[in-house]
Image: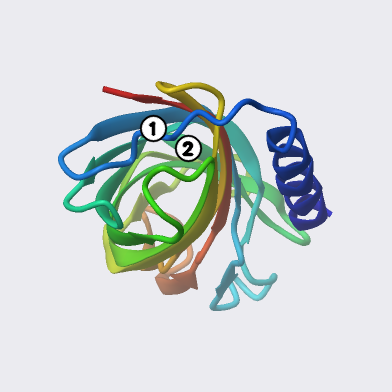
Amino acid sequence: MLSRSSSLLTVGLLSSAMFMSANAIAHNADDFFVRGGLAYVAPNESSDVVLGDSELEINNVLKIGATLTYMKSDNVGFEVLLGLPFTHEVSLKTSGHVANVSHLPLSVVAQYYFADSDSDIRPYVGGGFNYTTFLDEEGVGALASADVSVDNSFGYAIQAGIDIDLNDKWFANTSIWYLDIDTDVHVNNFPVNVPPIKTTINPLAFLVSVGYTF
């Protein structure tokens, strides 16, 4: 559903761009630019079965997201994914809501921008690495008495997006990220022994934003 909405948004931005005056996006060598907007994070989670109940289920969240980019050349850039911590509810099928966990993903990617630097529309792809820090872990419900912690994770990150010129400084953007996040969840100080829970999160992050070139 969201992926379809993201595609429709991209088509809408492309259509709107056809009616704009020809102002070049300043994605040239040595430029810096920022993008800021809404990020929708949808985990593709799987895990070990917990307490004979089910695998962990992690909800989707909507937050503010931002990126900072430096153009090494007219077509090659380096980007950092920024933002506020994303807080998710963690559930089990039978036990319901059992934990709250926040994570802060730091992703750095190298990008390739298609089309010339004076083009009004510039699609791009990128790839790099992601380091995710988990914080504010809290057991609730069936795990309210437990000490819940989550190991930090290091993995890869890939992205694709498109920038559409609004004027010589401002541009619209839509992009999608895939982050490789594998971790172990620990449940301590609980009446029943719970071994480390191997968990894969691997979220898709959809970002709709506005950018500004310095």
Q: Secondary structure at mark 2?
A: strand
Q: Amino acid at mark 1?
A: Gly
- Count residues near mark 2 (Cα–Cα under 10 Å), then give few for <14, some for 14-19, many for 20+: many
Q: Residue at x 59, y 58 (%)?
A: 43
Tag nearer the camera, 2 or 1:
1
User: Residue 108 vs residue 124: left or right?
Assistant: left
Question: Most extreme residue toward the front, as rendered?
Answer: 22
Q: Amino acid at mark 2?
A: Phe
Q: Which residue is mark 1?
A: 83
Marks 2/1 in contact by CB < 8 Å: the verdict is: yes
Q: Is residue 52 above or below residue 160?
A: below
- Quarter residue 22 falls in: top right
Residue 29 visible somewhere in the drawing: yes
Q: Is residue 178 above or below residue 136?
A: below
Q: Which mark is residue 185?
A: none
Q: CA distance from mark 2 to mark 1?
A: 8 Å
Foreground pick, 138 / 157: 157
Q: Which mark is residue 86?
A: 2
Quadrant of the drawing holding the C terminus:
top left
Across and down, in percent, residue 103 comes to: 39, 44
Q: Is residue 168 above or below residue 172?
A: above
Foreground pick, 213 / 205: 213
Q: Residue at x 43, y 47 (%)?
A: 146
Foreground pick, 165 / 187: 165
- Count residues near mark 1 (Cα–Cα under 10 Å), then give few for <14, some for 14-19, many for 20+: some
